[in-house]
C-alpha cells in the first residue's frame, strides 16, 4: 500500500479512544471535533455528539468555523450548509441520540500545507461548556499515527485547553500460531489469524483477526483463552485531561454473522448455491440451496432485461452455480487499453481527478493513466493512484438503460474486504450526473466490508450486523469484479461478484443500513460509469484495472 503521509484509519482507533473521550463527574452532552487523518493538501475529520445525559436528544444542529485556509469539500451522514462557517444538522435516520449514545458524521477537507485545524464546535447540544483540544498518538510494533480532537460540553466541570495527551500501547502473546486463543472483538469472539499479525484475514473459510489488531482495539476486548497474553498502556498529559473506556461509533461497530462463510445468495426469482460451509440464502420469491462441492461461492440472480438504446438490445439471461456467465451480445463497450500509450489517459475516456471533471492528469501524486508492465492480459492496464482525492476514469452511457452489468479485472495494493475502521471506498460508480460524485451509486467497501453507498442519501449497505463479516481478497493479485445494476425487479437491485462468487446484494429496503430507499432508487443513475479509486477514509491505495466490459447481459470472468 502506498503511504504518502496518510496513515490508515484503522490504526487510529486506540488513539481515538484515549484522545476523543471526555469525562465529567456530572452528566452532560458534548460535541467533539476529531481530525482522523491529514496530508499536505487535505484532511478527514469527524464531529461526534455524545449524549451522556439521562434524556434523549431529538434533532441536532452544530456549527464550526476555521480561522485559516481549511475548507470542507465533502460531507456524509449529515445535511450541511455554508462555506466557512459551516452548519450541519441531522438526517431523518440519525436525528435521535439516546441517553448514553454517540452519533457522528464525517467529512473531507482541503488545506494548503500545515496541520489541520481543530475548531470549536458549538450548538444547543454542546453549549454551555468549555473546550479542550490536543493530540494523541498510538504506537504498535511498526506504526505510529496521530489524531487531533476538540470537544465542547455542557458539563459544569472545568475545561482544559491547549493540553496534549500522548499514549502508547504494546502487546505481546505466546502460543503456537493462535492455538486455542481467540479474539474478543468488541464482545464478539473471533478466531485469530495464523498467517498475519495485523488487519483482518480470511482463513479456513472464515474471517480472522491479526493479533496486533485484536490487542490494540479501543474497547475492553483482546486475546482470550489458550496461552497467556499481556498488554500494557500508558498515557501522559501536559494539562488536565480526561478519558473513558470508549466512545460509541458507528464506524467501529462490528458483529458476526451466523455462518462461517459470509457469502450469500439472493435472487428476485430463483437461485441455487453450492458450498462446503454455511451460506445464507434469501429471496423475494423463492430460493433453494444444496451442498455439492467444496466451493464457498454462491449463486447469482436470474433476471431479464431490455434496453432501447442504439448500442444495446433486448435480452434475457440467467445465471447459476456461483457465476454470472455471459449469454452473449449486449456489450455496450469494452476496453483492454492495448492501443493506448504508456503514461497517457486512455482514449475515449474522461477523468475525475481531485474532484474535478477532466482536470490535470496527473495532478501531483493523483492520477489515472495507462501503464505498461502490469496487466491482466496483454501489456497495458490503467493505474489509479488516489485516496481522499479521487483518481478515476469515466465514460458516458447510452440513454434509456435500466439494466447494466459491469466487469473489471482489479489489482490492488491492499486487500479487498475486511478492513475494519474504514468509512467507505469506491472502485466503481454509476452516476446520475456526468463528472459529479454527489449523485452516484458507489460500489467498493462500506465500513471495511464489500458494499455499496448511495448519494445524495448517503445510505449504505450492508447493514451494521454484517460489518464484522464477509470475505477478504488478497492484495497484489488480480481479481475479477462484476457488478449488476438492475432496475427491472420490483425493487431496484445491485448484485456483486468477486471471482464469480456472489459477495453482495441489495434487493429490498431492509438491506440498507439507514432505512429503506425508494423502490426505484437506481432509476436516475444510468448516465455515466466511473472506475478507479476514491477513499472516504483517506486511504492511499494503488489500483490497476484491465479488461473492462460493460453490457446489458451478464459477463462473467472467462
Image (tube, rainbow, N blue to C red):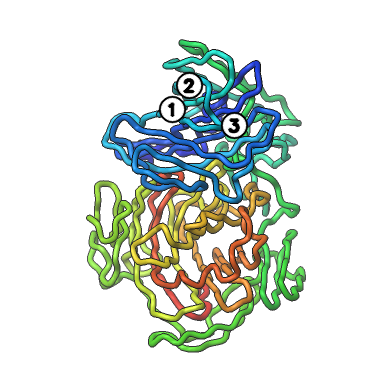
Query: Which label is found at residue 131?
Result: 2
CA separation in Å, label 2 and label 1:
7 Å
- The answer to which of marks 2 and 1 sits earlier in the sequence is 1
Q: Residue at x 57, y 51 (%)?
A: 449
Query: Mark number for residue 120?
Result: 1
103 or 370: nearer the eye?
A: 103
Residue 451 image position (x, y, % from top left): 56, 57
Find residue 50 and name its label.
Answer: 3
Q: Position of residue 284 (x, y in %)?
A: 71, 72
Report x, y in % for residue 329: 47, 86
Q: Is residue 118 above or below residue 554?
A: above
Q: Is residue 359 left or right of residue 218?
A: left
Mark 2 or 3, nearer chain start: 3
> Which structural element holds mark 2?
strand
**CA gap, disc 3 and disc 1:** 15 Å
Asked if disc 2 and disc 1 are in contact, CB closer than 8 Å, the reply is yes
Amino acid at each position: 500500500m502506498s503511504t504518502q503521509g496518510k496513515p490508515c484509519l484503522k490504526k487510529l482507533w486506540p488513539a481515538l479512544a484515549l484522545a476523543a473521550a471526555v469525562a465529567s463527574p456530572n452528566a452532560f452532552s458534548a460535541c467533539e471535533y476529531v481530525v482522523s487523518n491529514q496530508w499536505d493538501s487535505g484532511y478527514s475529520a469527524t464531529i461526534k455528539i455524545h449524549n451522556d445525559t439521562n434524556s434523549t436528544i431529538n434533532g441536532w444542529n452544530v456549527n464550526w468555523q476555521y480561522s485559516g485556509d481549511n475548507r470542507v469539500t465533502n460531507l456524509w451522514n449529515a445535511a450541511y450548509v455554508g462555506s466557512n462557517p459551516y452548519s450541519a444538522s441531522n438526517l431523518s435516520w440519525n436525528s435521535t441520540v439516546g441517553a448514553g449514545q454517540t452519533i457522528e458524521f464525517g467529512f473531507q477537507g482541503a488545506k494548503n500545507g500545515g496541520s489541520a485545524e481543530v475548531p470549536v464546535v458549538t450548538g444547543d447540544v454542546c453549549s454551555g461548556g468549555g473546550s479542550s483540544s490536543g493530540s494523541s498518538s498510538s504506537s504498535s510494533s511498526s506504526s505510529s499515527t496521530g489524531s487531533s480532537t476538540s470537544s465542547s460540553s455542557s458539563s459544569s466541570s472545568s475545561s482544559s485547553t491547549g493540553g496534549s495527551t500522548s499514549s502508547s500501547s504494546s502487546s505481546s502473546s505466546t502460543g503456537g500460531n493462535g492455538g486455542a486463543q481467540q479474539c474478543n472483538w468488541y464482545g464478539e469472539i473471533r478466531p485469530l489469524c495464523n498467517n498475519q499479525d495485523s488487519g483482518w484475514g480470511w482463513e479456513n473459510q472464515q474471517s480472522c483477526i491479526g493479533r496486533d489488531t485484536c490487542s490494540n482495539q479501543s474497547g475492553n476486548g483482546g486475546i482470550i483463552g489458550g496461552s497467556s497474553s499481556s498488554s500494557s498502556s500508558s498515557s501522559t498529559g501536559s494539562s488536565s485531561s480526561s478519558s473513558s473506556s470508549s466512545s460509541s461509533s458507528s464506524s467501529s461497530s462490528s458483529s458476526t454473522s451466523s455462518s462461517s462463510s459470509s457469502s450469500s445468495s439472493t435472487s428476485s426469482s430463483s437461485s441455487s448455491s453450492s458450498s462446503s460451509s454455511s451460506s445464507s440464502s434469501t429471496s423475494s420469491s423463492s430460493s433453494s440451496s444444496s451442498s455439492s462441492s467444496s466451493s464457498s461461492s454462491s449463486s447469482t440472480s436470474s433476471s431479464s432485461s431490455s434496453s432501447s438504446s442504439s448500442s444495446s438490445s433486448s435480452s434475457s439471461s440467467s445465471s447459476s452455480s456461483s457465476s454470472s456467465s455471459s449469454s452473449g451480445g449486449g456489450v455496450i463497450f469494452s476496453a483492454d487499453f492495448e492501443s493506448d500509450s504508456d503514461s497517457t489517459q486512455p482514449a475515449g475516456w474522461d477523468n475525475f481527478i481531485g474532484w474535478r471533471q477532466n482536470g490535470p492528469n496527473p495532478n501531483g501524486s493523483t492520477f489515472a493513466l495507462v501503464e505498461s508492465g502490469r496487466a491482466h492480459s496483454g501489456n497495458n492496464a490503467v493505474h489509479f493512484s488516489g485516496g481522499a482525492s479521487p483518481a478515476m476514469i469515466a465514460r458516458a452511457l447510452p440513454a434509456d438503460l435500466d439494466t447494466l452489468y459491469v466487469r473489471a479485472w482489479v489489482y490492488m495494493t491492499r486487500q479487498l474486504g475486511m478492513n475494519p475502521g474504514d468509512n467507505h471506498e469506491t472502485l466503481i460508480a454509476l452516476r446520475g450526473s456526468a463528472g459529479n460524485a454527489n449523485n452516484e451509486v458507489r460500489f467498493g467497501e462500506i465500513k471495511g466490508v464489500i458494499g455499496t453507498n448511495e448519494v445524495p442519501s448517503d445510505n449504505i449497505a450492508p447493514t451494521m450486523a454484517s460489518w464484522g463479516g464477509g470475505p477478504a481478497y488478497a492484495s497484489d493479485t488480480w481479481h475479477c469484479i462484476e457488478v449488476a445494476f438492475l432496475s427491472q425487479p420490483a425493487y431496484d437491485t445491485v448484485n456483486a461478484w468477486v471471482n464469480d462468487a456472489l459477495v453482495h446484494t441489495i434487493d429490498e429496503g431492509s438491506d440498507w443500513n439507514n432505512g429503506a430507499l425508494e423502490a426505484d432508487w437506481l432509476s436516475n443513475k444510468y448516465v455515466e460509469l466511473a472506475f478507479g479509486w476514491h477513499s472516504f477514509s483517506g486511504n492511499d491505495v494503488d489500483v490497476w484495472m484491465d479488461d473492462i466490459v460493460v453490457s446489458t447481459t451478464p459477463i462473467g470472468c472467462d
